[in-house]
Image: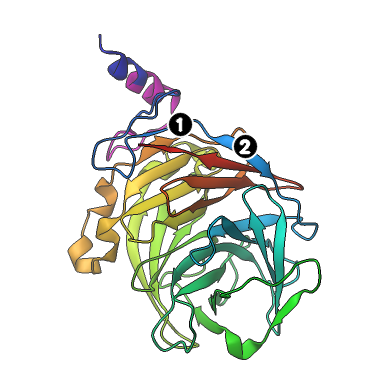
Amino acid sequence: MPRKFIVSVLLLASCRAPSPTFAVQAAEQRSFALPPAYPCARYSPVTQTGRVQAEGLRELSGMTASRQHKGVFWAHNDAGHKPKLWAIDSQGRLLAEYKLKHQANIDWEDIASGPCPLSVATASVNCLYLADTGDNSGSRPLSSILRWPEPLQLAQASTVTVKVDEQDLDAFDFTYPDGPHNIESLAVLPDGRCLLLTKDNGAASQLFRVTLSQPHNNQVESMGHLPVLGAIGKQAAVTAADLTADGHWLIVRTRSAVWLMDATDLSLTQGQLGDRLGRLRPFALPDAPDAHGEAVAWDSSGDYWLISEGLLPSIWQGHCVR
């Protein structure tokens, strides 16, 4: 019997209540081979590159790789902390610290890199999108996304905390068409629209698409569900997501796994998308051994990066093998 078939059977047997819509594609613990059309032929097991050393990052909730500064990552804390962003390197060393004036961290849950609109008068072509979308109690009347042009030059962390004026960023609020949701995952399409995935313990994760066009009442589309991510109960709760810069590949992190899927169809209209979302075929990628996976980000080389929650969390790199 072929080895690949045996591995697939063992993986499916270990999952309680697997999704009926499609089978999870097994990835061998050593090779993690993927189909030829995917961004890499193979991903090697993740390796630790360092630990987050920024003293202020006590409850890291989101991270994204900079598209302006190679080897730089942006991160932030969870609810109740100061409205700050930290720039760190792959070893976790603090590079710069920014405070967003006149903003509140109600429940910041994720951050993503994406294009700046032409209307933003800045030399930066990349913006940082910050999701204030956490709602553990399911009672928030509004969720919001902040958009800030990424600095062309980083400040010196050892000398000053840079204060970002309110007029230097844009804020957008919105409601969901079916009521409040707890969301910890944000990704940005190449056209600037935002994707949000719900954190539903034991249920299929719901996908929303938000068009940022005005300060209030922005358009929110309900796109459907990703049923495979809810196939193993609480450990399948979605905690982070990211898109490659071209919008082709979506990476999703849950409490206990990392998934890769083709995101090409996510730019389609609701009518064009139809039931395609339910027929996506996620592939398992190597995950970090840390408990409670919290953040994930692509870099420009096709590698992905993982950080978990807690003090001095480890930074892990998933290597694309070409």
Q: Residues within 10 Å of mark 1 (few under 14, many from 20)?
A: some
Residue with the mark numbered 1 = 44
- Residue located 40% across and 82% down the image: 117
Where does residue 178 sit, x and y in percent of width and height?
42, 69
- Snapshot quadrant of residue 212: bottom left
Where does residue 192 sit, x and y in percent of width and height?
39, 74
The relative height of residue 190 versus residue 24 in the rendered view (above or below) is: below
- Snapshot quadrant of residue 282: top left
Q: Depth check: 182 or 189 in front?
A: 189
Q: Residues within 10 Å of mark 2 (few under 14, many from 20)?
A: some
Main SS, magenta residues:
loop
Q: Which residue extends farthest top? A: 1
Residue 80 on the magenta segment:
no
Q: Going by the image, does 86 lie left or right of 25?
A: right
Q: Going by the image, does 77 lie left or right of 237?
A: right
- Residue located 60% across and 69% down the image: 139
- Residue located 25% across and 58% down the image: 265
Q: Secondary structure at mark 2?
A: strand
The relative height of residue 293 versus residue 16 in the rendered view (above or below) is: below
Where does residue 199 sit, x and y in percent of width and height?
52, 54
| Quadrant in which the C terminus is drawn | top left
- Snapshot quadrant of residue 146: bottom right
Mark 1: which amino acid? Ser
Q: Going by the image, does 297 lie left or right of 244?
A: right
Q: Depth check: 284 or 121 in front?
A: 121
Residue with the mark numbered 2 = 48
Mark 2: which amino acid? Gln
Q: Depth check: 175 or 53 in front?
A: 53
Q: Which residues are magenta?
A: 8-25
Q: Going by the image, does 255 lie left or right of 247?
A: right
The relative height of residue 20 versus residue 253 in the rendered view (above or below) is: above
What's the distance in space between the residues labelled 1 and 2, CA to CA? 12 Å
